[in-house]
Image (spheres, rainbow, N blue to C red):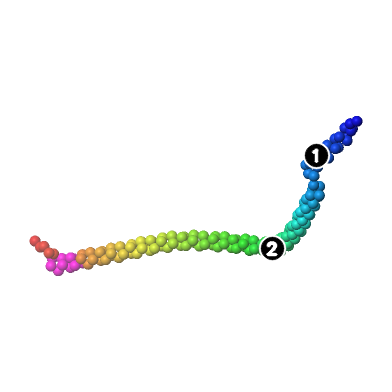
Amino acid sequence: MAPPKAETCAALCDEVAESVHPNFALLATHGQEVKATADGMLARLDELGAMLGTLRAEGREQRTALEPVLEAFAAGLARDFAYLDSVEDTVGAITHAVAQMEAQLAQLEQTHFRQARLRDVAAARKGIESLFGKLGGVTASLGQAGGGLTQP
């Protein structure tokens, strides 16, 4: 009588398993090595997680310590830039005032030189008038004294 189908299938599976990998001890050893490697990797991962936690904590501490210093530095820079802006405004005002003073000085110099030329012209006119006055007086004296230059 032939063995039942279930037994035949089980026997066939056992044969296939033995022919594919007949050394189960090797598989067990390999499985243990894989487990040991995985355990080592998990241990390193735990160490890395702990290290990252420490770094995060230190980073928070440093940030907490540096924030007031950086805020004070930023406030100082804001004051410095405000001062520079006021200095620029002052320099601009001084530049404008100097330009106005130069224009006023040029106007005064022009007015002064014009008045000086007018005084010179007036003095020259008086001198010429005085000269003609003297010439007229000399001519009149000659005319009275000698009866004129040309007498008929």
The stretch in magenta equals 137-147
**Which kind of residue does numbered mark 1 sit on?**
Val
* Alpha-carbon span between mark 1 and mark 2: 70 Å
Q: Position of residue 49 (x, y in %)?
A: 76, 56
Number of the front mark, 1 or 2: 1
Q: Residue at x 78, y 54 (%)?
A: 36
Q: Is residue 37 above or below residue 130?
A: above
Secondary structure found at label 2: helix
Using a 10 Å C-alpha cutoff, classify the residue at mark 2 as few (fewer than 14 neighbours), some (14 to 19) or many (20 or more). few
Q: Residue at x 73, y 60 (%)?
A: 55
Does residue 56 appear to the left or right of 119 in the view shown? Answer: right
Q: 126 or 139, which is in the foreground?
A: 126
**Label for residue 63?**
none
To which quarter of the image does residue 1 belong?
top right
To which quarter of the image does residue 22 belong?
top right
> Which residue in the structure is indicated by mark 2?
66
> Which residue in the structure is indicated by mark 1?
16
Q: Residue at x 85, y 35 (%)?
A: 9
Q: Tell me which numbered mark, 1 or 2, is placed earlier along the sequence.
A: 1
Looking at this view, name the residue that lies furthest to the right. 1
**Which kind of residue does numbered mark 2 sit on?**
Leu
Q: Is residue 31 at least partly visible in the picture? A: no
Q: Residue at x 75, y 57 (%)?
A: 44
Q: Position of residue 152 (x, y in %)?
A: 8, 61
Main secondary-structure element of the magenta-colored stretch: helix
Is 127 contained in the magenta span?
no
Count of marks, rendered view? 2
Looking at this view, name the residue that lies furthest to the front. 1
Looking at this view, name the residue that lies furthest to the left. 152
Secondary structure found at label 1: helix
